[in-house]
Image (spheres, rainbow, N blue to C red):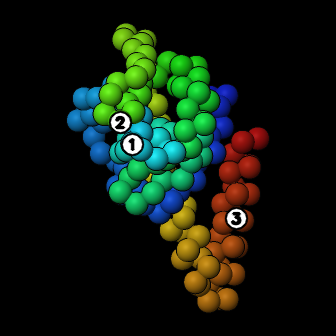
Amino acid sequence: MFLKKYKPDVKSGGGVPNVNDDVKKDVKNYVLIKKGKGKFFTVYDTDALIINFLFGYKILPGLKCGFPDNSLSKVLIKLEDFKISYKVIILDKLVKEKNYKNINDYTKLSIISKKTADANNRLDLLIKNIKSADQATLERIIEYIEQCLKLSMINLI
């Protein structure tokens, strides 16, 4: 698989809704990068999850992700490296497009990024709950996690 060697730097912003949507409903097969009058490009929905997965840009409420306009070339190079089709729109005009057609990995990366975002959201919730636990509960949680880790290490041997 092309992503096994890649370790994402995903940062949850707490604004990601349930990301276990059926990917088959996704008929779009490209990342849509938009820019208005400001200095930032913005992507939305699944595209935001993909950009978050690849670059670690924070997901904002409304399931959107932004990056500065001077980072566009870096973003496009990475999308091209991963064979992800994209469209760049500035002030409602298409200015650049790359379509990988049959070798486009948009769907594959959208599935991976959704699963990663979901796992990170679950981890964020666990951390929040652990931080609010009383001392006795915290000790039991830590002991349980340590036991689980020991068991997983034994299973690896």
Of tags 3 and 2, the one toward the viewer is: 2
Q: Which residue is mark 2?
A: 91
Of tags 3 and 1, the one toward the viewer is: 1
> In the rendered view, would you say 78 is above or below 135?
above
> In the rendered view, would you say 114 is above or below 88?
below
Residue 66 x, y percent position in the rendering: 49, 47
Q: Label 3 is placed on what type of residue?
A: Gln
Upstream in the sequence, badge 2 or badge 1? Answer: 1
Between residues 47 and 130, which one lies in front from this camera angle? 47
Q: Quadrant of the C terminus?
A: top right
Q: CA distance from mark 3 to mark 2?
A: 55 Å
Q: Which residue is mark 1?
A: 36
- Residues packed near mark 2 inside 10 Å, few (<14), some (14 to 19) or many (20 plus): few
Q: Give SS at disc 2.
A: loop
Q: Give SS at disc 3.
A: helix
Q: Which residue is mark 3?
A: 147
Q: Quadrant of residue 26?
A: top left
Upstream in the sequence, badge 3 or badge 1? Answer: 1
Between residues 75 and 148, which one lies in front from this camera angle? 75
Q: Mark 2 near mark 1, Cβ–Cβ under 8 Å?
A: yes
Q: Quadrant of residue 140?
A: bottom right
Would you say residue 42 is visible in this rendering?
Answer: no
Would you say residue 101 is visible in this rendering?
Answer: yes
> Is 58 on the left-hand or right-hand side of 94?
right
Residue at image coords 50%, 45%: 40
Q: Label 1 is placed on what type of residue?
A: Gly
Number of numbered discs on residues: 3
Residue 25 x, y percent position in the rendering: 23, 35
Q: Label 2 is placed on what type of residue?
A: Leu
- Residues packed near mark 1 inside 10 Å, few (<14), some (14 to 19) or many (20 plus): few
Q: Give SS at disc 1.
A: loop
Residue at image coords 39%, 33%: 90
